[in-house]
Amino acid sequence: MRSNRTIVWFRRDLRIEDNPALAAAARDGSVFPVFIWCPKEEGQFYPGRVSRWWLKQSLVHLDQSLKSLGSRLVLIRTESTLNALLDCINAIQATKVVFNHLYDPVSLVRDHNIKEKLVELGLSVKSYNGDLLYEPWEVYDEKGHAFTTFDPFWQRCLHKQMEPVSLIPPWQLIPAEGNVEKCSIEDLGLENELEKPSNALLGRAWSPGWSNADKALTEFMDKQLLHYSKNKQKVGGDSTSLLSPYLHFGELSVRKVFQMARIKQILWGNEGNSVGEESVALFLRAIGLREYSRYLCFNFPFTHERALLGHLSFFPWNADPSNFKTWRQGRTGYPLVDAGMRELWATGWMHNRIRVIVSSFAVKMLLLPWKWGMKYFWDTLLDADLECDILGWQYISGGLPDGHELERLDDPEILGSRFDPEGEYVRQWLPELARMPTEWIHHPWNAPLSVLRASGVELGQNYPNPIIDIDMARENLTQAIFKMWEIQAASKASGSEARDEVVAESEYLDIPKVVLLKDKAPCATISANDQKVPAFQDPKNELPIRKRTKCFEEKRKNKENSVNHVKDSNVSSSDHEDTCSTADSSRKKQCSTSTYSFSVPQQCSSSSNLKWPWQEQTDMEQSSGKDGMRIRVKTHFSA
Ligand SMILES: Cc1cc2nc3c(=O)[nH]c(=O)nc-3n(C[C@H](O)[C@H](O)[C@H](O)COP(=O)(O)OP(=O)(O)OC[C@H]3O[C@@H](n4cnc5c(N)ncnc54)[C@H](O)[C@@H]3O)c2cc1C
């Protein structure tokens, strides 16, 4: 038993505490911890600058921890993760490979393929749940279908037994010896020379690494959790836990977070502290949303490319690169939106409320494709997490049955007065409005000329006029929804081919049902814990319909009836095109997701050559300024 030599393949589980793969390997014999970096395999979801900075710091931290236990973290940069693993296996004559599960679409495919290959070669491969309270294949409704709305999913989770946390890290590690072509942390190439000055500033605000995560968690539990429900409304300051980057890189065990919060809930419940109880319930709900993001990605592995609800594929997005650029630069003329976008660019961070506001603005006011926004957030957020990002963007853009309705459009001016009543947040991020009185701070375009002059604001000069008037935006959105219904109805009537976002063979508003193939494991797995693969069921069984406001629903029916008569649709192909599909082949996608007996698609669309509009058009740089970060935008774009 003790003669086993196990490779511990670290990915986004960069901790030693409550790390099931590491603990199992340490129990079994000698260990060979390895982190493999393969930019080619990351494809279009190659992490952005701030996210890579975090990863780099966290790896250094993990290596130090492993060293203190008697081992070292081997770093490998490669063109193929499988080959790198095989090199490690040969070098130490490994008998086993262990790792913790990931659920994003890219990892799901890669891990499945690697596992299959290693098992074929006769290796023992075992994988564990190191990222979730429950595996996505453990939570189904009474009919065995995957949940498609959050509340019932979370209720089901809360009523399940959870595996206890194994808090104590391995006491010591016996290193497995062997020579592989390893590299230094610098050679991994997570940070280039140009990025270093900007990144240095991140170190002032954040301390990556699992033991720092632990400190942050303890402090949050002791000090802020009690007031979480009250403070959550504030958009500035440390009103929430700020744990998301730690959770993303697995520096914190989510089971530990959950259990610590639950203990507080019980204690406060006994004391009759209803404020505390409410705060914990809300915080646990946030943790539940993170669980749900993985759940959706696992059960519906197309959701990084298409909304869960098929109707969005008929939406006539206004894929206008110049509007997109204005939004990214924080020059829309709506102060709260612009402040959020500047904060994002400068720090890689935004409060959830601000994320909702800026993303809704892009989709509802500018009609920009939600996938553009998702990818931009992925590139710029410090806590960039594909599953949470997908959930967030689909939530605000009408892609989920229980998210915001497509027709819902919130006025940024009103949101500004509600969530930033004194205008402090806007003043912090928009120095050009720093002297604007609170009364006008969220709608400077209404301010009298004398006020503008006194505040040093010249609309159209040092601060833009609104990119679009709210009434016009509302009208545009309504028209777009009508158009969507028209195209949808025409497509239905003509029986034309499903389009990019459409899940082929499904009804327009349905979601393919997902069940677990109980009798069919993804490969010759060794343990009941091993990663499962989702399967689609006949979607025509029951059609979950998205809730929609009554008047819109009536209008939709009228529109649909009138268009249904027109067999010969006059919809042009350009109406159909979503110019920024993340897929390398939409056809392949449709095939892979429309089959009822589904296995992990081989092509998960990650094309490293695929360029996003802003990558071709702008070259942005950050540089440090006196007051923190200064934004310098170098534009090669001619609009
Ligand atoms: C358009 C959009 C994009 C988003 N992209 C990301 C992303 O790339 N990465 C990311 O981690 N979160 C994302 N979120 C979710 C959320 O905004 C952040 O998790 C949260 O703001 C992180 O701050 P916190 O750790 O202080 O959160 P807290 O409020 O303290 O919550 C604790 C933890 O719960 C999880 N959580 C909280 N809210 C959500 C949520 N709405 N969805 C999923 N998980 C949640 C996070 O892991 C978070 O760390 C996005 C939200 C939107 C609307």
Image (tube, helix red, strand yellow):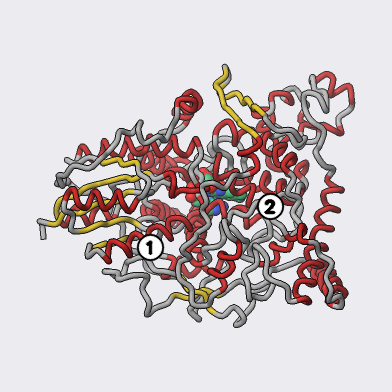
**Mark 2 residue crowding within 10 angstroms, few (<14) / some (14–19) / many (20+):** some
Q: Residues within 10 Å of mark 1 (few under 14, many from 20)?
A: some
Residue at 36%, 51% (x, y): give it. Answer: 253
User: Residue 72 appears in which quarter of the rendering?
Assistant: top left
- Which disc number belongs to residue 630? none
Report whether 519 appears left or right of 33.
Answer: right
Please state which of residues 434 and 480 is positioned toward the viewer in this rendering.
480
Which residue is at a point 83% across and 52% down the rendered structure image? 474
Badge 2 element: loop
**Which residue type does callout 2 highlight?**
Thr
Q: Which residue is mark 1?
A: 112
Q: Residue at x 29, y 36 (%)?
A: 183
Residue at left offset 56%, top offset 51%: 389
Q: CA distance from mark 2 to mark 1?
A: 30 Å
Give the left or right position of residue 44, taking residue 409 as reference: left
Q: Tell me if I can see residue 412 in this picture.
A: yes
The quarter of the image holding the N terminus is bottom left
Residue 500 locus on image (x, y percent): 65, 62
**Residue type beneath disc 1:** His
Reply above or below: 282 against 499.
above
Indicate whether 240 appears above or below 96. above
The image position of residue 139, as x and y in percent, is 45, 70
Q: Is mark 2 within 8 Å of ligand 1?
A: no
- Counting from the top left corner in percent of width and height, residue 36 is at 33, 45
Task: State the residue position of label 2.
Answer: 579
Q: Quadrant of the C terminus?
A: top right
Dots 2, 1 in contact, CB < 8 A: no
Q: Say if residue 229 shows up in the picture.
A: no
